[in-house]
Image: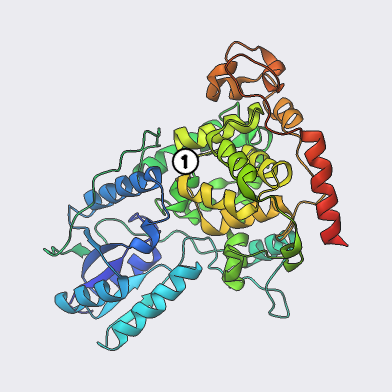
Amino acid sequence: MTDSPAIVWFRRDLRTGDHPALLEAATRARRGLGLFVLDDALRGPSGAPRLAFLYQCLRDLDAQLGGRLVVVRGEPADVVPRIAETVGAQSVHVSVDAGPYGRARDAGTERALSEMDIEFVRTGSPYAVTPGRVRKTDGEPFKVFTPFSRAWRAHGWRKPADTGPSTLDWVDFDGGTGVPDDPSHGADLPGAGEQAALTVWENFHRERLADYQHHRDRPDLPGTSRMSPYLRWGCVHPRTLLADLGDGAGAETYRTELAWRDFYADVLWHRPETARENYNPKFDKLAYDTGTAAAERFAAWCRGETGYPIVDAGMRQLLAEGWMHNRVRMIVASFLCKDLHVPWWWGARHFMRHLVDGDLASNQHGWQWTAGSGTDAAPYFRVFNPTTQGEKFDPDGAYVRRYVPELRDIPGKRAHQPGEIAGYPAPIVDHAHERQVALDRYAEVKG
């Protein structure tokens, strides 16, 4: 046990409870320096709602550390070693970052620290099981979710770590810049930070978990947990939730959703290029629409002005809240890829810019599932009909009327019918025609 402070470099783990890296740091040092680096490589692609939520989470973490969280801006490979040397740290502790950029950033930082004989210690990850751990019996990674899920359950996960704000004695450091002011965004964001996460979870567990398997696909009902922003930023660890789930159909369905999150992270770990490229390279030959008309249709989709109510409601919810219901994410993604014939990565980039819970692995591979180019991909002939999807999952039109004010006087399922409604856009494409175009193009790829 050293008197030199250990640095805990927070990234996607903005909490003090159930924090494996914090626990490991406490085995080596009595004192700690909490650090967060404002990395422009990550801030640049983020929209204002994401940054605002991040900054609010940082303020909550700073309060937990007694106002001693050190926030600095710069290149991590330069900033982290400089601070470590200044305070005389012998170790820097992090949670594993499984993303392509994070792995490269950490490798560069580790090299710089090693030149100073400072240890770079990776402990735990933002997932129940660290990506790369669950493999087939022959050592190969899983490519299909169901067998991964079985192996994931068999592998299991550790119990929550017993950590908190007092696990280390946090030290002062005068070289930080502080948490920036929130950028102007206009979105209705959820409460930020660890305690907010635990409160949201407690309410969901008590009031809605038992019926989760029935209501999670209904955007008109409060049937989801709304935990995704907190999982994305590590305000809570997934094993904290797993330890609390218990039995029952709702709990099992929720456990499966956490398995999907781990699966996509595992896929990205083994295939980092799929953050930007098709998982199935056959789809590199798929024809897309380009030019001015395609760009205009994409812009209408981004604004929520396609003339298809469920699509427009979802896109407007994204702009208003930095979040979108998962069923609606699939509907709007199908519409973009298969009605507008736009590359999936256009939509994925837009989502990552606006989603508070934007997780690279889940986002990119969720889009590829819909586009047909990913793991467990939806069959190419599955083209969501936005009207029937709306009628099925928002049967009374409540969700549509909530986010599309032009339709607030249209009762029931009529709210899902595209057409000439005063003040509301006419459909920008004919779904039946574009569905056939999509099928023809996908059939060419499939041979």
In this orientation, which residue lies closer to the viewer: 427 or 16?
Answer: 427
Compared with residue 110, is residue 216 higher up or lower down, i.e. above or below?
Answer: above
In this orientation, which residue lies closer to the viewer: 218 or 439?
Answer: 439
Q: Would you call the spot at circle 1 few (<14 residues within 10 Å), some (14-19), or many (20 or more)?
A: many
Compared with residue 331, is residue 407 higher up or lower down, i.e. above or below?
Answer: above
In this orientation, which residue lies closer to the viewer: 7 or 422?
Answer: 422
The colour scheme used here is rainbow
**Residue 42's image quarter?**
bottom left
Q: Position of residue 279 (x, y in %)?
A: 68, 65
Q: Position of residue 190 (x, y in %)?
A: 40, 37
Pointer 1: what residue? 201
Q: Residue at x 72, y 67 (%)?
A: 143
Q: Quadrant of the C terminus?
A: bottom right
Name the kind of residue labelled 1 in the image.
Trp
**Residue 414's image quarter?**
top right
Compared with residue 286, is residue 307 higher up or lower down, i.e. above or below?
Answer: above
The residue lying furthest to the left in this view is 174
Q: Quadrant of the N terminus?
A: bottom left
Q: Residue at x 24, y 58 (%)?
A: 166
Can I make out residue 236 in this image?
Answer: yes
Callout 1: SS: helix
The residue lying furthest to the right in this view is 447
Q: Position of residue 278 (x, y in %)?
A: 67, 63
Can I make out residue 247 in this image?
Answer: no
Q: Residue at x 69, y 22 (%)?
A: 416
In this orientation, which residue lies closer to the viewer: 61 or 268?
Answer: 268
How many numbered marks, from 0 up? 1
Q: Is residue 349 left or right of residue 365?
A: left
Q: Is residue 321 left or right of residue 324?
A: left
Q: Position of residue 117 (x, y in %)?
A: 27, 88
